[in-house]
């Protein structure tokens, strides 16, 4: 059984959340998803390339007329001062 008699100290810290610009950051990625069947095209760093999946999907499924774009942008939490 843990010892609950010892005092505990908790410290809070400020953080800034910002886009990750570090060299090891994952790349931005774009992908299109059919809102009818939920099939998703391949992600790509170029949004125009990702959007190119839609006409191919539409040719195969003429009734699938609505799509959504998924954008992945990496962010990083930067530690700030202790409170």
Image: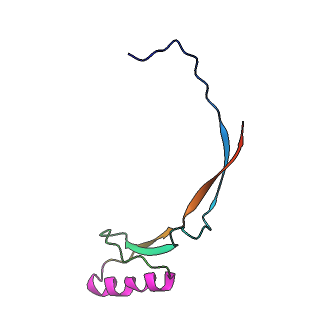
Q: Please name whichever residue, 59 or 40, is drawn nearer the observer in this view of the structure.
A: 40
User: At 58% from the left edge and 17% from the top edge, which residue is drawn?
Assistant: 7
Q: x, y percentage for residue 78?
A: 65, 53
* Direction left: furthest residue: 60
Q: x, y percentage for residue 70?
A: 46, 69
The magenta region covers 46-63
Q: Quadrant of residue 40?
A: bottom left
User: At 60% from the left edge and 67% from the top edge, which residue is drawn?
Assistant: 22
Q: Please name whichever residue, 43 or 8, is drawn nearer the observer in this view of the structure.
A: 8
User: At 28% from the left edge and 81% from the top edge, which residue is drawn?
Assistant: 61
Q: Quadrant of residue 64?
A: bottom left
User: At 37% from the left edge and 87% from the top edge, which residue is drawn?
Assistant: 55
Judge whether residue 50 is colored magenta: yes
Give the number of marks: 0
Q: x, y percentage for residue 54?
A: 38, 82
Name the quarter where the C terminus is drawn.
top right
Please tell me whether the stretch drawn in magenta is mainly helix, strand or loop. Answer: helix
């Amino acid at each position: 059984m843990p010892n609950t008699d010892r005092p505990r100290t908790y410290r809070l810290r400020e953080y800034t959340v910002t886009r990750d610009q570090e060299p090891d950051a994952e790349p931005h990625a774009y992908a299109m998803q059919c809102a009818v069947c939920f099939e998703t095209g391949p992600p790509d760093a170029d949004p125009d390339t990702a959007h190119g999946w839609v006409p191919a999907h539409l040719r195969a499924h003429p009734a699938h007329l609505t799509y959504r774009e998924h954008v992945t942008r990496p962010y990083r939490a930067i530690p700030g001062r202790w409170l």
